[in-house]
């Protein structure tokens, strides 16, 4: 009897242990996969983007890229190198094909071909480096100012729209869009959340309201873009303007902000509310003095993250607020102050979209895409970190 | 179980009753469909300590929260019939300003709930929301309230530190001081000592004894000895009904109802 018990126990134990292990490993692998994806994206953008933003000489940051307007890039590549590169490429290709057609017995030949390809590739690299040193790159303004243009017999000449200059106006535009929509979304969202969590009576109506707000966050961003276009651009007659973009982005961020704010307010202990009401505070006074201040860190963090999320969307701004190219900065050429909010701006996500939708892609357009993406990541990261710092600081002040 | 309840000398048994301040008549109260209080009638007398005792869930807190209309916060809570009058004014009349009522009837909660602000700001809160800004007035009230709550000596050097740094017993006395700062006439305490150790409890009890001179106090407690020590009158509740109400000495030494007797002697509840 005793032996049987031990036997059964040990058998079941190993099976259980196997499942335990299996589950642990599934969980672990999933997590590593996610980290791998995230790491890959950040690395990709970081490595490629830093080529556009950093440079090897002091001050190490390519300030032109961050401050200048986008321009057409004029590229002159030395013809003699270009020709040689093409020849080598062709040869590598033909050797490769030859290699594939060889019978399995011709090991000697195959080895020889491999060596040939290797040497060709080395040659290609050297030449490519030379090409990069000898090529001439001009932004549009530089190109127009040239007295003597490079001769077309010596150079292969190509132009790439928006790939020269920098992304200064897009950075400014994105920051303006983000700040404006934060202001609108925060005030609207917090007021709505206060009403829902503190004043409204629980029941069917409230549930329907909550559900529809939640559903709003499932609506595709292009729908918000079209809605904003119909509502703000056309119906209100604001035109393609910053204010139309603010409202469109704000409405898009509202579901997240409302649910997060409600959540933060609900998590404030009931005792604070009751305590102040029992001291003769009106309902609003109790909320203002003993709910909102403590809920604020949570509200701010989630709101800023919510806005940062939608600020990266292209669809909602491409019909409402974004210009592909605008010569003037937002504060230039205003006739009256109100014009400021009724002007379209450039924005990073739309800029990335515009540059990326140019075909063919090559190292010149990629430079611009990755540079913009890098800067955008940086801006979002800045907002995220500042919201976290803010949270920690307020949290320290009010702790319970 | 042996009883070592010490009952105070029979000062509550004096012939002339003090004027009553809270008059409850035939109160029926329900949360939605389920009735929590059944036909309660009693008087709470001025400048006395009245204790509510009874097993958990019998409706003591519910009843107490009727006196400052705290139950208004609960959507389903409803007084079905009956009246509560404080100084002869029906407090459930439509003309009543609930804010004024709550200033008049202060409350200390079972779970001490100091605001996450400084000690000073906690006490000053009630005055500030009334629009009192003069710092001399605030200062003097803060000091006098902390003194009446027997906390001044312990905190006078750290008024600007967070109230959450205080010990549990200090926090509860802070909440009492905070309630006093609004200058109420009646003080409701819902199990003020339930989270405190014996020493802190003794301090709060001493405080209740002291405050009795100026305030009418209603205190809910699960602690028989405490009820016996601090109160002049005791009300025993069971399943939403007021079973017995009378001078504390009588309730503990000579109860008329057998349920009361069983409860105070620790045989059930
Ligand atoms: N907010 C509420 N909603 C619905 N029912 C409630 C609510 N609060 C209390 N009750 C019910 O009313 C009854 C009385 O509760 P109450 O809190 O007044 O009891 P109590 O005597 O204070 O108990 P305790 O000694 O445990 O604090 C209980 O049956 C309880 O379940
Ligand atoms: Mg209770």
Image: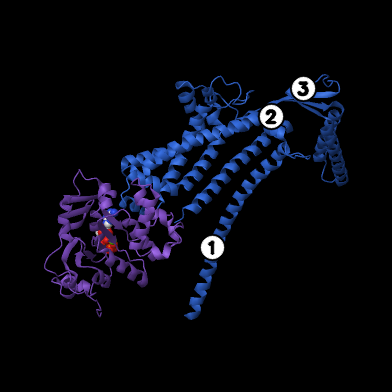
Chain colours: A blue, B purple
The x, y position of residue B206, in whole percent, is 30, 69
B36 or A155, which lies in front?
Answer: B36
The x, y position of residue B203, in whole percent, is 34, 69
Q: Residue at x 46, y 56 (%)?
A: B160
Question: What whole-number distance in Å separates the C-alpha atoms at marks 2 and 3?
Answer: 15 Å
Q: Which residue is mark 1?
A: A20
Q: Which residue is mark 2?
A: A68
Mark in the foreground, 2 or 3 = 2
- Give the secondary structure at mark 2: loop
- Which image quadrant is residue B174 in? bottom left
Mark in the foreground, 1 or 3 = 3
Q: From the viewer's perspective, is residue B122 above or below residue A177?
A: below
Determine whether, in the image, residue A124 is placed left or right of residue B33: right
Q: Residue at x 23, y 68 (%)?
A: B231
Q: From the viewer's perspective, is residue B108 above or below residue A167?
A: below
Residue B75 in view here? no
CB contact under 8 Å: marks 2 and 3: no
The crowd level at tag 2 (other Cα within 10 Å; few <14, some 14-19, many 20+) is some
Question: What whole-number distance in Å separates the C-alpha atoms at marks 1 and 3?
Answer: 67 Å
Of pointers 1 and 3, the one earlier in the residue sequence: 1
Q: Which residue is mark 3?
A: A143
- Tell me which chain the residue with mark 1 is part of: A
Question: What whole-number distance in Å separates the C-alpha atoms at marks 1 and 2?
Answer: 58 Å
The x, y position of residue A268, in whole percent, is 41, 51
CB contact under 8 Å: marks 1 and 3: no
Q: Quadrant of the C terminus of chain A?
A: bottom left
């Amino acid at each position: 009897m005793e032996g049987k018990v031990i036997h059964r126990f040990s058998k079941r134990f190993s099976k259980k242990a196997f499942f335990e292990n299996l589950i642990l490993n599934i969980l672990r692998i999933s997590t590593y996969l996610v980290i791998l994806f995230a790491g890959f994206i950040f690395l990709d953008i970081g490595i490629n983007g830093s080529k556009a933003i950093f440079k090897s000489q002091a001050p190490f940051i390519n300030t032109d890229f961050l401050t200048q307007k986008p321009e057409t890039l004029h590229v002159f590549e030395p013809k003699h190198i270009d020709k040689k590169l093409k020849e080598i490429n062709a040869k590598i290709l033909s050797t490769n094909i030859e290699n594939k057609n060889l019978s399995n017995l011709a090991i000697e030949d195959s080895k020889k071909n491999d060596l040939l390809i290797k040497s060709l590739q080395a040659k290609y690299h050297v030449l490519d480096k030379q090409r990069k040193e000898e090529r001439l790159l001009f932004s549009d303004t530089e190109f127009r100012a040239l007295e003597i243009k490079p001769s077309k017999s010596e150079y292969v000449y190509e132009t790439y729209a928006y790939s020269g200059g920098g992304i200064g106006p897009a950075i400014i535009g994105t920051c303006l869009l983000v700040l404006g929509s934060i202001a609108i979304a925060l005030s609207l969202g917090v007021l709505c959340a206060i009403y829902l969590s503190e004043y409204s009576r629980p029941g069917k109506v409230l549930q329907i309201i909550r559900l529809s707000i939640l559903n709003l966050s499932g609506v595709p961003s292009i729908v918000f873009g079209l809605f904003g276009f119909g509502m703000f651009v056309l119906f209100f007659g604001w035109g393609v303007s910053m204010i139309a973009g603010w409202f469109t982005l704000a409405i898009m961020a509202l579901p997240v902000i409302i649910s997060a704010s409600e959540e933060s307010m609900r998590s404030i202990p009931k005792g604070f509310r009751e305590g102040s009401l029992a001291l003769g505070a009106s309902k609003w006074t109790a909320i203002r003095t003993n709910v909102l201040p403590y809920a604020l860190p949570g509200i701010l963090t989630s709101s800023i993250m919510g806005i940062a999320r939608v600020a990266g969307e292209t669809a909602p701004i491409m019909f409402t607020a974004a210009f592909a190219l605008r010569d003037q900065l937002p504060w230039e050429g205003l006739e009256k102050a109100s014009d400021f909010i009724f002007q379209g701006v450039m924005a990073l996500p739309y800029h990335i979209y515009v540059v990326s939708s140019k075909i063919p892609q090559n190292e010149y357009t990629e430079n611009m895409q990755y540079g913009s993406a890098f800067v955008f990541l940086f801006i979002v990261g800045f907002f995220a970190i500042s919201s976290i710092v803010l949270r920690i600081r307020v949290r320290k002040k009010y702790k319970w | 179980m042996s009883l070592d309840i010490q009952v105070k000398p029979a000062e509550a048994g004096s012939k002339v009753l003090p004027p009553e301040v809270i008059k409850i008549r035939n109160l029926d109260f329900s949360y939605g469909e389920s009735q929590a209080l059944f036909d309660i009638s009693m008087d709470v007398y001025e400048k006395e300590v009245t204790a509510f005792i009874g097993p958990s869930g019998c409706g003591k807190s519910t009843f107490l929260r009727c006196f400052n209309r705290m139950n208004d916060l609960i959507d389903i809570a409803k007084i079905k019939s009956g009246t509560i009058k404080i100084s002869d004014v029906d407090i459930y009349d439509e003309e009543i300003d609930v804010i004024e009522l709550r200033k008049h009837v202060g409350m200390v909660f079972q779970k001490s709930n100091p605001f996450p602000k400084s000690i000073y700001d906690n006490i000053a809160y009630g005055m500030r929301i009334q629009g009192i800004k003069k710092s001399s007035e605030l200062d003097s009230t803060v000091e006098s309230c902390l003194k009446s709550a027997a906390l001044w000596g312990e905190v006078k050097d750290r008024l600007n530190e967070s109230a959450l740094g205080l010990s549990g017993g200090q926090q509860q006395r802070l909440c009492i001081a905070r309630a006093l700062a609004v200058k109420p006439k009646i003080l409701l305490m819902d199990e003020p000592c339930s989270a405190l150790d014996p020493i802190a409890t003794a301090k709060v009890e001493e405080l209740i004894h002291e405050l009795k001179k100026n305030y009418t106090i209603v205190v809910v407690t699960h602690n028989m000895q405490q009820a016996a020590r601090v109160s002049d009158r005791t009300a025993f509740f069971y399943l939403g009904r007021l079973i017995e109400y009378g001078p504390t000495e009588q309730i503990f030494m000579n109860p008329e109802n057998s349920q009361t007797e069983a409860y105070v002697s620790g045989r059930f509840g």
